[in-house]
Amino acid sequence: MSIVVTGATGQLGRLVIDQLLATTPAAGIAAVVRNKEKAAGIAARGVELRIADYGRPETLDGVFRAGDRVLLISGSEVGSRVGQHAAVIDAAKAAGVAQLAYTGILGGPDADFLLADEHKVTEQLILDSGLPYTFLRNGWYTENHTANLAPVLAHGAVVANAGDGGIASAARADYAAAAAAVLTGEGHLGKAYELSGDVAWSFAEFAAEVARASGKEIVHNDVPAAAHQEILVGAGLPTDFAAILVDVDEAVRRGRLAGTSGELARLIGRPTTPLADTVAEAVAAQR
Ligand SMILES: NC(=O)c1ccc[n+]([C@@H]2O[C@H](COP(=O)([O-])OP(=O)(O)OC[C@H]3O[C@@H](n4cnc5c(N)ncnc54)[C@H](OP(=O)(O)O)[C@@H]3O)[C@@H](O)[C@H]2O)c1
C-alpha cells in the first residue's frame, strides 16, 4: 500500500509531495506523472514514479494497487476533464484502492458557475463508483491573483467584474497541507470538506494590499462582465477561457467563493496563510 499523488509535477502536487515527505518515508509514496523527465526531482527524493496520462486510459492500467490511498488532483485541461477523471476513477476501482481523495471545487454540487461543472460530474462519478472517497472542495488559491502581478503593477489597476464580492482564498500550500492530512490521517472517508481561507477579501481590498506591499498607487476598476471579457481577450486569453474567468467573477459577486467555514484551518491545524503574506511574496518576486 502506498500514498499515491496524481498530478504530482503540478504546482499543487509538488507541494503535496513536500508535505507528505515531512511525515512519511519516501518508500511509502508514489507519484503518478505523465512526464518522467519533469518528475526527476521527485524521483531523486526516493518517491516511486508511476507514469500515466489521464487522457490515455490504457496507461492507467495497473497504476494503482489494492489498498493505495490515492489523491486525484483534478486535471488542467478544462473541457476534457470528465473523461480523464472517469478513466482514473475506473483504474482506482479496478485496483481496489482504500481511499480516493479528489480536489474538487468550493460548494461541490451547489457551485453554480461554469468552472464547477466538471468537478460536479467527477464527484458524482466517484460516488457512483462506490470507492471510499474524500472530497477536498478547494476554494481559490491566492496565487491565482498574485501569479501575474506584472500588469497590475504596470497599469496601477486591478480589473474585475465581481463588485464587492469576497474571495476566501488560501495559499496553495494550505490546500496541499490539507490533502496530506487526509491522506495520512484517519476518519476522512466519506467526508466532503469545504476548504477556504479564514478571511474573505474583496478586489478593492486586494488592490489596497498590492498598493501597501509595492508602495505604488493601485486602484480597483470594477467593470461590466462584457468589458472584462474584452479586456481579457485583448490581453491574449482564449475567448472560452476568458468567459470562464468572467463567469467566476460573477460567482464572486454572488458570494459563492466567500465562505469561511474554517474547515481548512481545522484540517491543517493552523490559520490559513493571510492574503498579505502571499501578496508581499509576489511583489518581492517582481523586484
Ligand atoms: N482552486 C483553485 O484556485 C484552482 C486554480 C487553478 C486550478 N485548479 C485545479 O487544481 C488542479 C491543481 O492545481 P495546480 O495549480 O497544481 O495546477 P497545475 O500546476 O496546472 O497542475 C496540474 C497537474 O495536472 C497534471 N495533468 C493535467 N492533465 C493531465 C493528464 N492528461 N494526465 C496526467 N496528468 C495531467 C499536470 O501534469 P504536467 O505537470 O505534466 O502538466 C499537472 O501535474 C488544477 O489542475 C485544476 O484542476 C484549482
Image: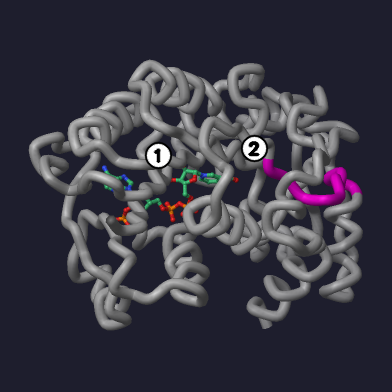
Residue 89 placement: quadrant: top left
Q: Residue at x 21, y 65 (%)?
A: 49
Q: Residues within 10 Å of mark 1 (few under 14, many from 20)?
A: many
- Which of disc 2 and disc 1 is earlier in sequence? 1
Disc 2 target residue: 193
Give the quarter of the figure containing the C terminus: bottom right
Does the magenta portion include 9?
A: no
Q: Residue at x 32, y 32 (%)?
A: 85
Q: Amino acid at mark 2?
A: Tyr
Q: Position of residue 246 (x, y in %)?
A: 64, 30
Q: Is residue 181 left or right of residue 119?
A: right
- Main secondary structure of the magenta stretch: loop
Disc 1 target residue: 100
Give the quarter of the figure containing the N terminus: bottom left
- Residue 148 makes an appearance in the image: no
Most foreground residue, 240 or 109: 109
